[in-house]
Amino acid sequence: MRRSWLSLLLVAGVPAAFAASAVNWHHWEMAAFERAKAENKIIMVSVGMEGCVACARMDSITYTNEAVIDRLNEHFVAIEVDAESRPDIGERYSDWAWPATIFLAPDATQVLALRGNRLPRNFIPILDDLLAKQKAGTLEPDPRSPYAAPPQPAETDLSRMRDRVRGQLDRALNEKYGGWGRGGIGGEHSGSRLRHLYLRAHLYDDSELKGLALKSSAGFLNAIDPVWGGVYIAAFPEDMKVPPNFAKLRAIPEKRILVQANAITAFALGYKHTGDQKYLDGIAAVDRYLNEWMRAPDGTYYTNQKSQPRELPRGMSSADYWLLDTDAKRRAFGTPPVDRAAHTDKNGEVISAYVLAYESTGNPAYLESAQRTAKAILDDRLKADGWLVQTVDNNRIAHDARIHSLVTEERPFLSAQAWFGTALLGLYRTTGDEKWLAAAESIGKATLATLHDDEIGGFFATIPDATAAIIPPRKPLESNGTAASFFYDLGIYVKNPGYTAAAQNALSAVGLPGIIRREGKITGEFAMALEKVTTAYVEFSIVGNQDHPNAKALFAAGFDVFEPRKLLHYEAPGRYPDRGVPAMYICNPDMCSIPIVDATDVAGHALAFRGPATSAITP
């Protein structure tokens, strides 16, 4: 839970009478909103994550300030949220980054949202101004309030929606350095955008797009920590203007699990297209960091590592610390704490990245990592109804000095189901093992049963609870994009048109122009789903005895083909005849290849399916 000076003093044995006071934090639950309404108090929601430097500064400086504490406890209802253990709320307020500080009127109408850290000297006037406006009756709704679930689906053709999202991402693409925007290479949302760029380059055999994709992959190499491995959240090319705090290191020294997954993805795709050793070395550097620093005993991965040890000498910055060039030099000042919460959605992304690394390099260690993590999640987090919990208490978290309370909610969150289902399909694609497909379909059925809007389509971020009566439920664009990709692929694999229809309807249900514009460049997963649905799958089916050497050779040949829409699997005779010897059929909605019995012919036949299918479904 949030460690105030009060709790630290009590742990140290200092009597409470001599301890500082602390903010009276509430969880996001109906009781807190009811109290605010009953007492006519403004609600302040603090949303952040453990690895966020600015969150830590606000927690240790602003929320320990006596004047701030007094105002919040007397005049506000303060709610804290860990954005990763409650991904529905984290996504809702992600426009304001971390920390996001949201103020709501007593009836829960948003009146102000602040982005980033605020020190007491500029936070107290904001609190006082809000109180003065409330007393004068002049609090006004914030026009930038988060969007709610649209009451009607978009009426546009999905191909036009796809082109709109393409253009939006392209306008943010940094053609000089690679990546998107002006904030350096890396970031938590870069993996999906990069996969989308490689997919488009492949679809249209576009060398310019491929060059930009490779430039973006190479940019991640600059973010590698040369001592412990892993990548920082962002890195700055040599001639890019750098914020003063990061000028020495030329990187932002936070190590988040999702950025590690993005880096593996970038390096795997870079290696697949170039065969350059530097990308193999990049994967190895991230893998070393993940296994030495971030792997839990059960095989899952922790969330992040903080930017510096708990205390550094006066005058030594976090950038100075990370510039130390040996393990011994760093350890002399301590090691940055690791947040030992492990979240299902983030682990799903790590598994997917390791699957891609295995597909690109053939290194079985990467597949083993992916399978071990997937098994741990399924063994420990799968509920009887078929859905997965986002976070569990691993009995070690309680000993961590956390900024935010870790609330382990017994409810399904869309991001966890969609990302882990996607990871399972990746394992099925690379191994042909039916157990992964069966687990994926179980999660798919549970997601439809618990989170799907059966009236107009799309998926809610979580099951709407009592707070939905005052804060409208949300169908997040990106998570619906991930879910749409998952259900589209699942539907093709198991030949269930209901799943593919759910995928299409999810895109229409959330893809209103205003929502797409608002999400800006955070639309990579949505873009990937639109590409899949509008350009169609490429299915590699191997029919016949899968233990036959010829079947294994065909599977290996299909495994080696780069095709981002590839659905590779073994299939029993039925749709295709049993020819006595295993054969592969490559198909999309327009056409099928001839039966392929010689594994050396697979790559050549696959090239015929490179472009979009002309009869792809575009309602």
Image (tube, grey):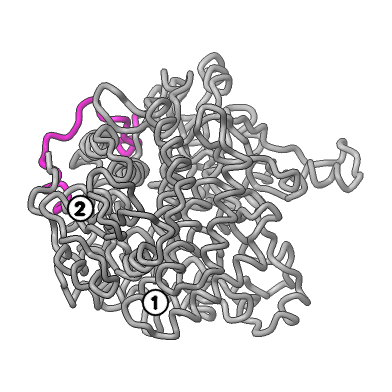
**Relative to the observer, which residue lies in front, 77 or 49?**
49
**Which stretch appears magenta?**
141-164
Toward which corner of the image does residue 460 lie, by quadrant?
top left
Residue appearing at x 57%, y 18% in the figure: 35
Give the left or right position of residue 523, taking residue 356 as reference: left
Give the left or right position of residue 367, taking residue 59 as reference: left
Quarter of the image with the N terminus is top right
What residue is disc 2 on?
165
Residue appearing at x 20%, y 38% in the figure: 512
Residue appearing at x 58%, y 30% in the figure: 410
Q: Amino acid at mark 1?
A: Gly
**Relative to the observer, which residue lies in front, 462 or 32?**
462
Q: Position of residue 279 (x, y in %)?
A: 43, 79
Query: Do the CB atoms of the residues marked 2 and 1 lie less than 8 Å apart?
Result: no
Location of residue 612 with respect to 10 vertically, above or below: below
Outermost residue on the left side: it is 614
Q: Main secondary structure of the magenta part?
A: loop
Q: Amino acid at mark 2?
A: Val
Q: Is residue 148 part of the magenta span, yes or no?
A: yes
Residue appearing at x 32%, y 51% in the figure: 525
Earlier sequence position, callout 2 versus callout 1? 2
Q: Position of residue 86 (x, y in %)?
A: 52, 38
Local crowd size for mark 1, using a 10 Å CA cut-off: few (<14), some (14–19), many (≥20): many
Q: Is residue 129 part of the magenta span, yes or no?
A: no
Location of residue 483 with respect to 190 vertically, above or below: above
What residue is disc 1 on?
219
Q: CA distance from mark 2 to mark 1?
A: 23 Å
The numbered disc on residue 193 is none
